[in-house]
């Protein structure tokens, strides 16, 4: 399971994306999430897909590796596709099976929303694959620093998000170990009626939650022993430096937004 999971993992390398300032990468990802909603036609999504492919190449990661990492969320993407395919009721009927009708707008929305979902998974995964959790914490805290004037807990929020990202692969690995242990004891989670499958999940969830709470308690104890008292008065061992490549990366988003807007409103 860990080999298939890409979100929350960090892959060390020496690529352009790895060397970028974490603040630039955070802005890049959040801006891409907003910009992708501008696309509403085939050419718009072709441009967005090409932009994502170039971003993957800049990260030095294998496209095949990222595609294999989509397998855990393929069920959700497929469910989204079918939901739009059968419940959108606009346009001409393309397929009529009596109790199920497929409309032109359903096919269009199913493709576009699934494509959008896939590109978002790719881009958000690139953030964690090319940035260490501590760098994400530093970058997010730096971006939220202006809000400290209104007593916003920027450091604490950044730390919580970093810890959450850090423990995603850990919890997935823990789930895999518990599943194998339950299967070794004769538990069958992949066959039988739905009711029996749900019952088989209960022995999996209980030890998973117990282990998660134990890890949280151990982490809190370790932080207290090391004298952690929040962000006040803390200094930084790793300093952040904004460079030309970070500016160029954000300018590329402006070009992407302009291209998508041109295809949507003028072409």
Image (spheres, grey):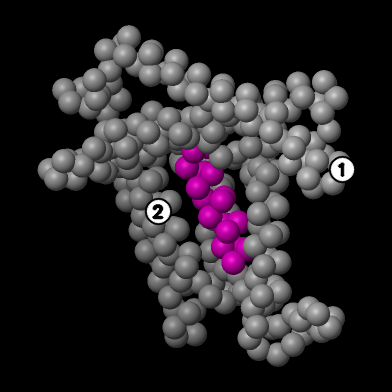
Compared to 211, does 113 lie above or below? below
Mark 2 falls on what kind of element?
Answer: helix
Q: Residues within 10 Å of mark 1 (few under 14, many from 20)?
A: few
Which residue is rendered at x = 78% and y = 45% of the image? 195
Task: Give the CA separation, mark 1 to mark 2.
Answer: 42 Å
Which numbered disc flags the more N-terminal residue, 1 or 2? Answer: 2
- Give percent across and percent down for residue 153: 23, 37
Q: Main secondary structure of the magenta part?
A: helix
Picture coordinates of residue 252, whole percent (x, y): 41, 59
Q: Nearer the viewer, residue 85 or 13?
A: 85
Where residue 31 is drawn, which disc sits there? none
Residue in the image at 53% along x and 25% along y: 212
Indicate whether 225 appears above or below 86: above
Residue closer to the observer: 60 or 165: 165
* Nearer to me, 258 or 164: 164
Q: Which residue is mark 2?
A: 30
Q: Judge whether residue 130 can be spotted in this image.
A: no
46 relative to 159 in the view: left or right? right
Q: Is residue 128 magenta?
A: yes
Element at badge 1?
loop
Residue 218 left/right relative to 21: right
Horizontal side of 142 relative to 136 (left or right) equals: left
Dot in front, 1 or 2: 1
Span of residues in magenta = 113-129
Q: Are marks 1 and 2 in contact (CB under 8 Å)?
A: no
For residue 192, which numbered disc appears in the image?
Answer: 1
Residue 254, image x, y percentages: 37, 64
Image quadrant containing the N terminus: top right
Residue 182 seen in this snapshot: yes
């Amino acid at each position: 399971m860990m080999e298939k999971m890409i979100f929350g993992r960090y892959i060390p390398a020496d690529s352009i994306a790895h060397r970028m300032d974490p603040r630039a990468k955070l802005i890049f990802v959040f801006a891409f999430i907003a910009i992708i909603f501008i696309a509403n036609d085939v050419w718009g999504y072709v441009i967005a897909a090409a932009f994502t492919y170039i971003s993957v190449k800049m990260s030095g990661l294998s496209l095949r590796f990222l595609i294999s990492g989509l397998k855990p969320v393929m069920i959700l993407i497929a469910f989204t596709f079918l939901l739009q395919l059968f419940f959108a009721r606009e346009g001409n009927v393309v397929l009529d099976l009596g109790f199920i009708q497929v409309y032109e707008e359903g096919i269009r929305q199913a493709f576009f929303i699934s494509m959008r979902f896939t590109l978002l998974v790719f881009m958000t995964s690139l953030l964690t694959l090319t940035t260490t959790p501590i760098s994400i914490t530093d970058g997010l805290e730096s971006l939220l620093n202006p809000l400290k004037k209104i007593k916003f807990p920027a450091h604490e929020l950044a730390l919580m998000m970093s810890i959450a990202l850090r423990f995603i692969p850990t919890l997935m690995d823990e789930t895999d170990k518990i599943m194998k242990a339950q299967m070794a004891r004769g538990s069958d989670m992949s066959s039988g009626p739905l009711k029996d499958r749900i019952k088989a999940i209960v022995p999996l969830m209980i030890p998973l939650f117990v282990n998660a709470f134990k890890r949280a308690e151990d982490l809190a104890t370790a932080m207290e022993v090391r004298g952690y008292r929040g962000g006040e008065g803390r200094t930084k061992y790793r300093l952040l430096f904004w460079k030309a490549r970070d500016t160029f990366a954000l300018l590329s988003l402006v070009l992407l937004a302009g291209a998508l807007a041109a295809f949507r409103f003028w072409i």
